[in-house]
Image (cartoon, rainbow, N blue to C red):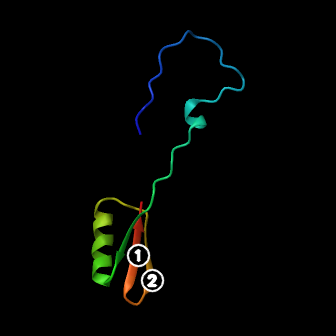
Amino acid sequence: MTDLVLPALPATEPAADTLPLAAATPAPAAAWQVATLTTLREVEELLDMLEAHGVAEREVVVLRNDRFTVRWR
């Protein structure tokens, strides 16, 4: 997200109902990335890679005996 640069305005008292720009526009939540894998070895390797890259939020779901979903953001 880039910083918003506003032009300089004359100094005035803000209105009582004026909100700061940051409060008016909340940051969007990051979307989940998803991978479906077929072996526990693949799951472990992906989780290790994500951890090595600093991804703190990650989950594993067992779909069936031969399918796994890993998701992270």
Q: Residue at x 44, y 61 (%)?
A: 32
Identify the disc placed on residue 55: none
Q: Residue at x 44, y 24 (%)?
A: 5
Q: Quadrant of residue 18?
A: top right
Using residue 6 as the reference point, say whether residue 13 is left or right of it.
right
- Residue 37 vs residue 58, the one in the foreground: 37
Q: Residue at x 31, y 77 (%)?
A: 44
Sort mark 1 into few (<14), some (14-19) or many (20+) by Cα contacts within 10 Å.
some
> Which amino acid type corresponds to the residue marked 1 in the rendered image?
Thr
Using residue 58 as the reference point, say whether residue 25 is left or right of it.
right
> Which amino acid type corresponds to the residue marked 2 in the rendered image?
Leu
* Cα gap from disc 1 to disc 2, whole angstroms: 7 Å
Which element carries disc 2, helix, strand or loop? strand
Q: Residue furthest top?
A: 10
* Residue to which mark 1 is pinned: 69
**Which quadrant of the rendered structure holds the C terminus?**
bottom left
Sort mark 2 into few (<14), some (14-19) or many (20+) by Cα contacts within 10 Å.
few
Identify the disc placed on residue 63: 2
Disc 1 to disc 2: CB gap under 8 Å: yes
In x, y percent, where is residue 37? 33, 78
Q: Residue furthest right?
A: 16
Q: Is residue 4 above or below residue 53?
A: above
In x, y percent, where is residue 24? 60, 35
